[in-house]
Structures are given as structure tokens and as C-alpha cells.
Image (spheres, rainbow, N blue to C red):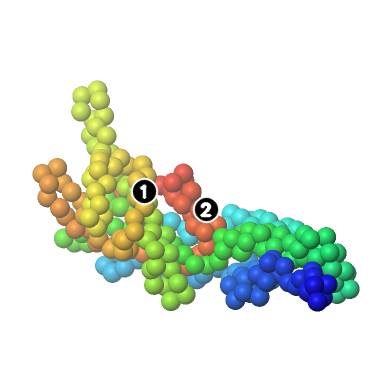
Amino acid sequence: MDHISNVLDAHSPSPLSLLSHLPQIKRADAAITRAAATGIPEQGEQTGGYTEPYTWLAHVPLLPLYSAAQHDLLAKQQCRKDRLVADMDRADPDKMLTAGQRGLLSVVGHLSGGGSMVSVKRFERRLIGANVVSSGMLMKQHKLAVFTRWTIPGPRGEVEFFVDVFEHRFIESNYKFTSGNLVLVKVGLPPTSSSGKKKDVPKVTLKLLQTEAKELKSQKMWKKHWNTEACEAVSVVRQDGREEAMVIVARIQRACSTVEIMEITKRFDKEWIVPVV
């Protein structure tokens, strides 16, 4: 009886093998398989434009939410994912070994007391697979890029200056916010007259929701991470403390990926010039 018991113990599933039957592991394996099979997703459609009564300003450019650089970055990310998938396949015993070879390695692993070698290879595959899933998520169209131009309304539709706000918000498929956003701000202030030999540097303080962006210089970027609702209120704080609410001149938006968001953010920071009126 002891001999039979020892034989049964030697051929009983290893802990690593048992893990493969857990529901969570099965779901993870399914997610890895799906991520490995996906390519570059279709880019989200841009919507929006100039609002009434500011359509007469439609010739003034808005921040482009698309660029050729985004296609190159997505292609590079896909190549990186494909290399990870190739590495993962080399560690996948279900693809690289026949059923007989898998059975032989499993028996050898049990007899040597080291557990199933096939299960170890599957564990290695899951480690690489986690990077495959992560790489795929960087290309998933799960964020909303929003560019909004604000101004102080004049009595006859004229504008004092522009405030350009770029946000990226985390979204679900139905475009509902889930976990906060990042706000980037630039202002296009007209130059002031010289005072003696020293030229005055124009500055402005803005209030975005309940957050103040103090003494912003023209074309200098201000940014803020916050876990709150979308930025739907901007005011100018005058020197006497009086607040003047701004209105939306134009808004464009599109769903995009983390890779694309990073490209737009960099371009807004380094290249974008807010038009000065």
C-alpha cells in the first residue's frame, strides 16, 4: 500500500499545475491570448469645433489632435508587442511541444521531485504575457483628448485673449469618466506697452474649477493632475480679486490611446502657440 501511495503522490499534480485550473488564472490566460492577437486599433473620430457666436473665428487654428507621429508611435508599439509575443510563444509548451513531449517532461519533473516542468514553462509564458497585455493597453483607445479654447466675452462678440486648455480624461466605452484627468493650460496674452526701459511682462491668474493657476505668462504651460470632474469652468482673477467667467470659443475631442495622448501632450507643451488677438 505504501508503494502504491508513493506512486500516486509522485504523479499527483504539482502546485503550479493546479494554479492553471483556478478561474483567475484561466481569465488571465484568456486576456493574454486576446492581447497577443490584437493589432493597432482604429483611431477615434474627432468631433466638435467653434461654437456660436464665435464661428467667425473658425479660420484661427485649433490644436491638431491627430499627427503623422502618432501613426509611427503606434507602429513601433505594435512591433514591441509582436516581439514580446514571439518571446512568449518560445516559452509556451502548448505551442512548441507535442503532447508526447509535454507528457514526458511532466513525468521527468515529477520523478525528479521538482514539479512539472511544463507548468514552469507556462508560468514563464504568463510573466511575458503580462507585458504583452500592458503593451496592448498603451494602444487601447480608452482616453478622451479634449481641447477647449476659452475667452472673456465682449459686448459685440469680440475677444480679449485666448486660454487654451488641453485635457486627457480616462473613459469607458460609453465616455463616462472613471478616474480623474490631467489639465494643461496656455494663454495667449497680447504684449503690453513698454514702461521706461523695461518692458512689462503680461501675466494673468486663472481659476479652473476651484484650482488657481497664478500669474501665468504668455505661452508658458501650466499643468495639474487632479481626481475630479472635467474642467468646465474657467475664470480670470483680476488684480482686485474680482472674478470674470470665461466662455467656450471652441472645443474638439476624440478618443485615443496613451501613446497618442503622450504625443499630443508633448506637442502642446513644446510646439503649440496660442493665437494672440
Relative side of 46 to 166, left or right: right
Picture residue at 79% right of the left edge, 61% below the top:
113
- Does the CB distance between marks 1 and 2 fall below 8 Å? no
Relative side of 266 to 162, left or right: right
Q: Secondary structure at mark 1?
A: strand
Nearer mark to the viewer, of 1 and 2: 1
Residue 82 appears in the rendering: no
Residue type at tag 1? Lys
Q: Nearer the viewer, residue 228 or 127?
A: 127
x, y percent for residue 97: 85, 68
Q: Residues within 10 Å of mark 2 (few under 14, many from 20)?
A: some
Picture residue at 19% right of the left edge, 61% below the top:
156
x, y percent for residue 17: 71, 69
Whichever of callouts 1 and 2 sits on the residue coming sooner in the sequence is 1
Q: Nearer the viewer, residue 122 or 175?
A: 122
Residue found at the very far top of the displayed protein: 197
Q: Nearer the viewer, residue 271 or 114?
A: 114
Q: For residue 163, which numbered disc appears in the image? A: none
Q: For residue 223, which numbered disc appears in the image? A: 1
Location of the N terminus by quadrant is: bottom right
Above-or-below relation of 93 to 151: below
Relative side of 162 to 63, left or right: left
Residue type at tag 2? Glu
Q: For residue 263, which numbered disc appears in the image? A: 2
x, y percent for residue 236: 20, 51
Q: Residues within 10 Å of mark 1 (few under 14, many from 20)?
A: some
